[in-house]
Amino acid sequence: MANAKVSTFNAYPLCTTSECTSVSGSASISEEGTSIFLSFSIQGLPPLSAGGLHIHEVQNVGAPSCIDALPKGHYYDHYYDYDPWTSVEWTSSSDGSFTTSSPIEVPNAPYLISNGYVGHAIVLHSPSGAKISCGMILATSSPSPSLSSNDTLAAVLGVLSALFLLLIGYVCVRMKWYKGEQHLDAKDLLEQANMVEMNVRGSSGREGGGFLDNDSPAAV
């Protein structure tokens, strides 16, 4: 999958000749290990010719166009003598097109990968070495991961399990509350029954006492 792309190539800044203005096309960039791979679909090049193509550093990284970016030299680690771009080139067909059947590998480019090439530019050179076209490198947005049927089923089951646990928890809380209410009701009834019994006993004692007093031999 591409890590970056050039949506369109335009004439190199300040170049107004037909050799520059006729070029158009796109490119994509991917990486693996310490290599980057370039794929091109270019039109409007000089027919049956060859020229250099390189990633160039720019002064204003991420600028919207090459004229704003101000391209500089080849993009590589200048602390080392090796320039990976010296042997990379395009070769056009009779109609002036250049389409890669397989990506062009640029080996030994860990500096580009670690420092990032998005926001820099790809520059195409004419057979004589002049800079004729330029395209800004843009990030390729990653597609959102899609869920398989198994993933979807697992997600649904997870939601249902969570809802079931919530329901069980609710039922348990309600049962505890219900038992507590029943317990309180029974306790209240028992206390009320005891109070009634005490009242009845007290009333009976008072009435009984009077009856005994009235009917006792001492009262006769």
Image (tube, grey):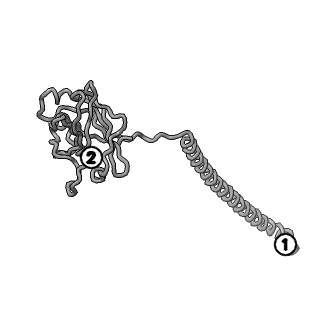
Residue at the limit of the structure toward the top, as seen here: 95
Tell me which corner region of the image, top left, top right, bottom left or bottom right, holds residue 30: top left
Residue 201 x %, y %: 77, 65
Locate the C terminus and report the quarter of the image it occupies.
bottom right
Measured along the vertical axis of the image, is residue 189 above or below residue 101?
Answer: below
Depth check: 164 or 118 in front?
118
Residue at image x 68%, y 59%?
183
Identified by mark 2, the residue type is Tyr
Identified by mark 1, the residue type is Ala
| Residue bearing mark 2 | 117
Depth check: 14 or 37 in front?
37
Residue at the limit of the structure toward the front, as seen here: 48
Label annotation for residue 89: none
Residue 106 x %, y %: 30, 46
Residue at image x 22%, y 36%?
51
Residue at image x 74%, y 65%?
198
In front: mark 2 or mark 1?
A: 2
Label 2 environment density (alpha carbons within 10 Å; few <14, some 14–19, many ≥20): many
Secondary element type, mark 2 = loop
| Residue bearing mark 1 | 219
Q: Position of 177 compared to 3: left or right?
A: right
Residue at image x 33%, y 44%?
105
Residue 65 x %, y %: 19, 37
Measured along the vertical axis of the image, is residue 171 above or below residue 96?
Answer: below
Q: Position of 151 compared to 138: left or right?
A: right
Residue 132 x %, y %: 17, 34
Secondary element type, mark 1 = helix
- Are circles 2 and 1 on residues that touch, CB within 8 Å? no
